[in-house]
Amino acid sequence: MNPDLSVAIGPLQLPNPVGVASGTFGYGQEYAELLDIGRLGALYTKAVTLEPREGNRPPRLTETPCGLINSIGLANPGLEAFLEHKLPYLRTLACPIVVNVSGSTEDDYVAVVVGIETAVGRLEPGRPTGADAYEINVSCPNVSHGGMSFGTDPHIVENLTSRLRKVTRRALIVKLSPNVTDIGEVAKAAEGGGADAVSCINTLVGMAIDTERCRPLIARGTGGLSGPAIRPVGVACTWKVAQAVRIPVIGLGGIATANDAIEYLLAGAVAVQIGTALFADPRAPLGVLEGIEAWMRKRGVTRTKDIAGMLEFQT
């Protein structure tokens, strides 16, 4: 019997738990010839902001011994260009599309979601929208205004989520920052505001320095650390958040293999996202999906959501 890999995120149904993380997969076109996008559980788009953004000045990317520091700064073409040039392509894809939304103010976030809702509302009923859900990025450490500052204050998170809940019926996923004292409290705030799920974690603040030139390797100084180094932090945060809220948790941070993903699922996630690993292996999500299914078959697990209940603590 084939395991049931489907996942429910509020009104959104994912065919399987393996998605690709925002900021690492563009808007899909960049990877179209490298893997079968239709097999993904979800595509989380690159961020969409109200106005176009060029991002931070270079250098804005550097490798570390066990990961990557980026300071891209949410570079994107803005809402108008997204609607005109990106959304039509996204509507052709066979997997669920989760649009990542960011902004400098709460009004920016609301304007982006309203703009997308208005655009897809003009489509004929039953047609693919290219925007099946929203991931609300309140946790980017690489911008000067907005970004992570929203995600560190539970009151702001709850208020922003509540405002967005009023303008869309689509699933709302709030992306959490690990750069906080109590991630569980922020998750509760998102739940209180009406979020259908939370995703965790975004990148950790990191810094690398060129000791010969006595300069940071990132022009802005600090950036977001991703990759294998942050996986234990991500797993721990996922476990804490899963204990704190009743809504689904989507885990990400340092996932490259099926075993990595299963760690997150055992910690309480119902789905995962793969990011930095895509740069080394664009087909990594399909390998992870196949590995999860094989693991479930071996243990007689029939549903993905049952994996969380298998975690046992030593007594």
Image (cartoon, helix red, strand yellow):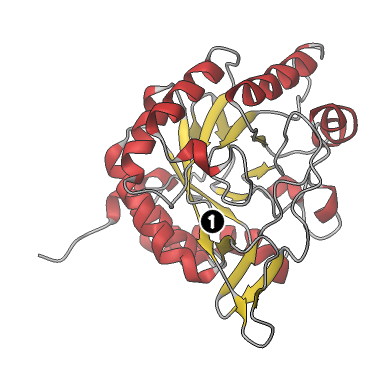
**SS class, disc 1:** loop
- Residue furthest toward the left? 315
Q: Mark 1 = which residue?
A: 203
Where residue 190 sits in the image (x, y, percent)? 42, 30
Q: Is residue 99 above or below residue 223?
A: above
Q: Residue at x 64, y 59 (%)?
A: 285
Where residue 186 sits in the image (x, y, percent)? 38, 37
Q: Is residue 45 above or below residue 291?
A: above
- Residue furthest toward the right? 85
Q: Is residue 69 above or below residue 177?
A: below
Q: Residue at x 77, y 18 (%)?
A: 120
Q: Tell me which amino acid carries mark 1.
A: Thr
Q: Nearer the viewer, residue 249 or 159?
A: 159
Is 141 positioned to the left or the right of 123 in the image? left
Where residue 225 sits in the image (x, y, percent)? 56, 63
Q: Quadrant of the C terminus?
A: bottom left
Q: Nearer the viewer, residue 292 or 112?
A: 112
Residue 282 lies in quadrant: bottom right
Q: Nearer the viewer, residue 196 or 262?
A: 196
Where residue 49 sits in the image (x, y, percent)? 72, 33
User: Within 10 Å of the Cα at label 1, are there few (<14), some (14-19), or many (20+) other Cα atoms?
Assistant: many
Residue 70 lies in quadrant: bottom right
Q: Residue at x 67, y 67 (%)?
A: 218
- Residue furthest toward the bottom? 212
Is 253 positioned to the left or the right of 188 in the image? right
Residue 281 appearing in the image: no
Q: Is residue 293 above or below residue 175?
A: below
Q: Nearer the viewer, residue 169 or 147?
A: 147
Q: Residue at x 66, y 25 (%)?
A: 108
Q: How many marks?
A: 1
Residue 222 appearing in the image: yes
